[in-house]
Image: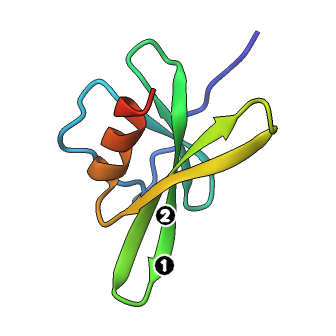
Amino acid sequence: MTTVIEARSSDTPTLTSHPRVRLVAAAPSLWRVLDSAGIVIGHLQQVAHARGTRFRARRFHRPSQAFRDIGEFWSADEAVECLRFAR
């Protein structure tokens, strides 16, 4: 049996344009991005930048057993959209 504990903290990004996608805390400044069926479509990582906060879209690459960066964005919505369309 698997239990998913969803941590809602004040630093969890708010997604405004993706009502069917949710974020589940995985580590500090890192969230799993789940679709409406609960399937992980990637990870969202918050990254400090000299001009503000950036959001990195990451996806697990099974053959190499490593995460690959898809891109960095100024908003969490853009990063999640990238993960959705890169499926």
Of 68 and 23, the residue lying toward us: 68
| Circle 2 SS class | strand
Q: Amino acid at mark 2?
A: Gln
Question: Could you say which is closer to the camera, residue 30 or residue 59?
Answer: 59
Looking at the picture, how far across and down is residue 42, in whole percent?
A: 54, 37
Given residues 10 and 36, the one toward you in this image is 36
Q: Secondary structure at mark 1?
A: strand
Q: Callout 1, which amino acid?
A: Ala
Q: At x 81% / y 38%, what residue is drawn?
A: 65
Residue 34 relative to residue 84: left or right: right
- Location of residue 27 with respect to 23 vertically, above or below: below
Residue sitting at 44 percent across and 12 percent down? 37
- Residue lying at 76% horizontally and 9% vertically, measured from the top left: 1
Residue 14 is marked as: none
Rendered image quadrant of residue 85? top left
Residue indicated by mark 2: 46
Q: CB of mark 1 within 8 Å of CB of mark 2?
A: yes
Q: Residue furthest front?
A: 63
Q: Residue furthest bottom?
A: 50
Q: CA distance from mark 1 to mark 2?
A: 7 Å
Q: Is residue 5 left or right of residue 50?
A: right
- Residue denoted by label 1: 48
Q: Check the image and report above or below for 71 versus 25.
A: below
Q: Quadrant of residue 16?
A: top left
Where in the figure is residue 21, as x and y percent of width and height? 35, 29
Q: Quick one: label 1, few (<14), some, or many (20+) residues within 10 Å?
A: few
Q: Quadrant of the C terminus?
A: top left
Quadrant housing residue 12:
bottom left
Q: Position of residue 63 (x, y in %)?
A: 79, 31
